[in-house]
Image (cartoon, helix red, strand yellow):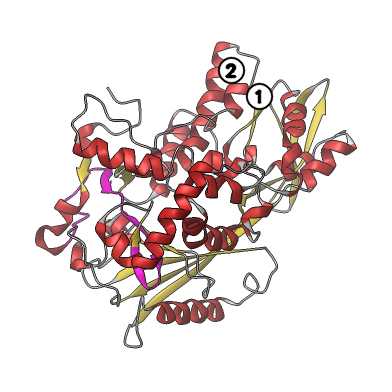
Amino acid sequence: MPAQGMPSSDDIITGRQKELKAGGPDPEKEDRVMLLRQRVSRIYYLNKFFDYPISLKPQTFINMGFARTVKSGFSYLHSCAVKREENSLEDFYINRFGKTLYSMFFEGYTEKLWGRHPSQISADWGAQRVKGLSIAAVIKDVVSKIVPQKSREVETSLIEQFVYPKFGPGQLWETAAAEFEKLGGKIIKNCKVEKTVVKDGSVKDYICSLNGETVSFDGDIFFSSMPVKDLVEGTDGVPDNIKEIASGLPYRDFVTVGLLVDKLKIKNETKIPTVSDIVPDCWIYVQDTGVKLGRIQIFNNWSPYLVKDPVNTVWIGLEYFCNEGDTFWNMDEKECVDYAVDELKKMGIIDGNTVVSDYHREKVKKAYPAYFDTYKDIDKVVKYLDGFENLYCIGRNGQHRYNNMDHSMVTAFEAVNNIISGKKTKENIWNVNTEAQYHEDNK
């Protein structure tokens, strides 16, 4: 039986089959809330598509060419025989994939994402995000599909389907907010926390700015999903060493450019059916270091209900990783859009005849908590914050952990369970997504 507020199996539809009927979806006739999506994400490298994660299909070796394939094979065998001490993310990747595949599919993209070379990033990031994935895991998965087994465990990054809200992730939060208010809760928007007031080892209240006025909110229990850096900075009486660690925690900011186009130059050469036969990808990872673009989303494939005319137009999202205040961040919207369009043409994703009929640029500060600089000492900050009995740090920024949306929600579930049960330790909240496997990895 589904949890309260969650869709039952009757509310879930297999999206692509429904969408292909009559050439596309009909939001007025389809009232189910969740879509069962085929997880298709690929790497765009050497102007060719590679499976993400890298597979052992014949097309992979054709795309790589004979020389690269042989070199990659010997490089991987060397990594099996000679293991590096894992002092960095670079060591982590090379141990699992070999130096050649690391150079092709991890090195450049990782540096785009974090603005740092993998040799300067903690191996913790790989341990959390890649988990058990390796060439050995890929081989094991291929064999398990060929040889029947009673139960088949799948590495997270190899999962092939997921459930997605019909109108995007925002629909989930809108529904949750409506349920909260229905039960008597009150949501105050556009309210900025300026200061956390503590007394006798507990949080007493938050001092906030709301519509130009200073207001205070007291309470018995507090949840914080704000960046750890900001929480510590605005809290009374924090020791200098904790302040120093928190102030040095790094982040990577994010700009996404949405483009509504009439067509894509890249063609659907897979056997996966799509509306208007566009490529089936949810995400396309851009390994080419000759462009700044890091990743492309095709919103038609997440849910065609997000697109007014999914038969004749395609909404694509272009993801750029940057730092707040740098040159890219400070571009005006039109300049940024023109830059993005030029990169798409350079890559062969669109051509000069493609019509861009609409666009939108969105900036997100502190989108990615990063694992370098003072991060190595974050356990001291965690211990300090856990000292406030009635404060629970949850979510991606609330824990300075690169969690996905599902795990960010689970941290909140764990916190609530602790409160209900009277559990005092908070280790279970901080330990969400530190196990070897988990449900889904959308990056």
Residue sitting at 51 percent across and 29 percent down? 435
Q: Disc 1 marks which residue?
A: 221
**Residue range (magenta):** 24-49
Which picture quadrant has residue 354? bottom left
Q: Classify 30 as above or below 314.
A: above
Q: Residue 33 colored magenta?
A: yes
Mark 2 lies on a secondary structure that is: helix
Dot 2 and dot 1 residues touching (CB under 8 Å): yes
Q: Residue 245 colored magenta?
A: no
Q: Which of the two discs, 2 and 1, labels the residue nearer the N terminus? A: 1
Q: Is residue 297 visible?
A: no
Q: Is residue 71 visible?
A: yes
Residue type (three-letter) at the residue carrying disc 2: Ile
Judge by depth and name the residue closer to the eye, 72 or 60.
Answer: 72
Which picture quadrant has residue 57? bottom left
Q: Classify 89 as above or below 72.
A: above
Q: Position of residue 246 (x, y in %)?
A: 77, 42
Q: Position of residue 14 (x, y in %)?
A: 19, 45
Mark 1 lies on a secondary structure that is: loop
Q: Position of residue 278 (x, y in %)?
A: 24, 67
Judge by depth and name the residue closer to the eye, 103 or 191.
Answer: 103
